[in-house]
């Protein structure tokens, strides 16, 4: 399989990201396996398993049900340590009322459709603006590789006048110290 963005050949069909450009390839492998057809997804269906509304309702129900486990434990802890019933009241408030509020929030404000653009799905489709067009050129034109003109040849003496690297100058200093000793 080749990356649709940069053309890099992938070592394995199970590769999740392109080794050259980093494009997410999990959706591309599905498209290749289906002979170029994008499989129908349930992302547009209201109440689909991955909708934010459904997840919010599940979280609220989980918090509310957790009340029936945590409140008795907090009550026992309060009785054992002879404390005021602060912990059970706090857990009723946080878990019970918090769970109900989470359900109400999910029903009122969260969308019932699927998650939009999960993990770069636009990269799989190429985005609306890039469909049907090639990516922009990213190479150096051939004209940049012409031979230098007659007056622009560099002499090897010119290369010696340029400052060297830090390691070259350090090596020269160390060699000079060895000769001086």
Image (cartoon, helix red, strand yellow):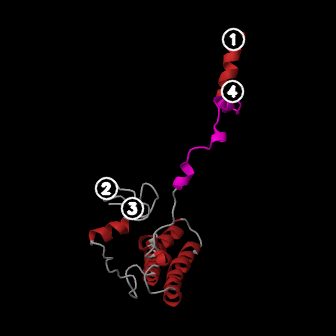
The residue located at (67%, 28%) in the rendering is 157
Please state the extent of the stretch shown in magenta in the rendering: 140-167
Give the alpha-carbon distance from disc 4 to disc 1, as whole Å. 15 Å
Question: Is residue 119 magenta-colored?
Answer: no
Where does label 4 land, which residue?
A: 169
Structural crowding at the residue carrying mark 1, measured as other residues with C-alpha within 10 Å and reported as few (<14), some (14–19) or many (≥20): few
The residue located at (34%, 80%) in the rendering is 41
Q: Residue furthest bottom?
A: 108
Q: Secondary structure at mark 3?
A: loop
Question: Is residue 156 magenta-colored?
Answer: yes
Q: Where in the figure is residue 118, as x and y percent of width and height?
A: 45, 73
Q: Residue furthest top?
A: 181
Given residues 159 and 118, the one toward you in this image is 159
Give the alpha-carbon distance from disc 2 to disc 1, as whole Å. 57 Å
Q: Of label 2 and label 1, which has the lower sequence position?
A: 2
Vertical comparison of 130 with 25: above or below: below
Tell me the number on the disc at residue 30. Answer: none
Give the alpha-carbon distance from disc 2 to disc 4, as whole Å. 47 Å
Where does label 1 land, which residue?
A: 179
Give the alpha-carbon distance from disc 2 to disc 3, as whole Å. 12 Å
Please name which of the two marks, 2 or 1, marks the residue nearer to the observer. Answer: 1
Where does label 2 land, which residue?
A: 12
């Amino acid at each position: 399989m080749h990356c649709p963005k940069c053309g890099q050949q992938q070592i394995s069909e199970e590769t999740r990201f392109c080794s050259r450009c980093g494009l997410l390839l999990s959706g591309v492998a599905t498209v290749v396996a289906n002979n170029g057809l994008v499989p129908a997804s349930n992302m547009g269906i209201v109440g689909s398993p991955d909708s934010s509304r459904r997840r919010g309702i599940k979280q609220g129900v989980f918090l509310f049900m957790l009340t029936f486990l945590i409140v008795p434990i907090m009550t026992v802890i309060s009785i054992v340590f002879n404390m005021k019933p602060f912990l059970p009241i706090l857990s009723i408030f946080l878990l019970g009322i918090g769970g109900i509020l989470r359900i109400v929030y999910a029903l009122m404000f969260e969308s019932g459709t699927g998650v939009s653009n999960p993990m770069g799905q636009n990269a799989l489709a190429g985005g609306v603006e890039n469909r049907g067009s090639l990516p922009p050129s990213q190479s150096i034109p051939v004209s940049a590789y012409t031979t230098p003109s007659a007056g622009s040849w560099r002499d090897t003496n010119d290369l010696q006048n340029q400052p060297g690297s830090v390691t070259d100058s350090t090596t020269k200093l160390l060699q000079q110290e060895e000769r001086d000793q």
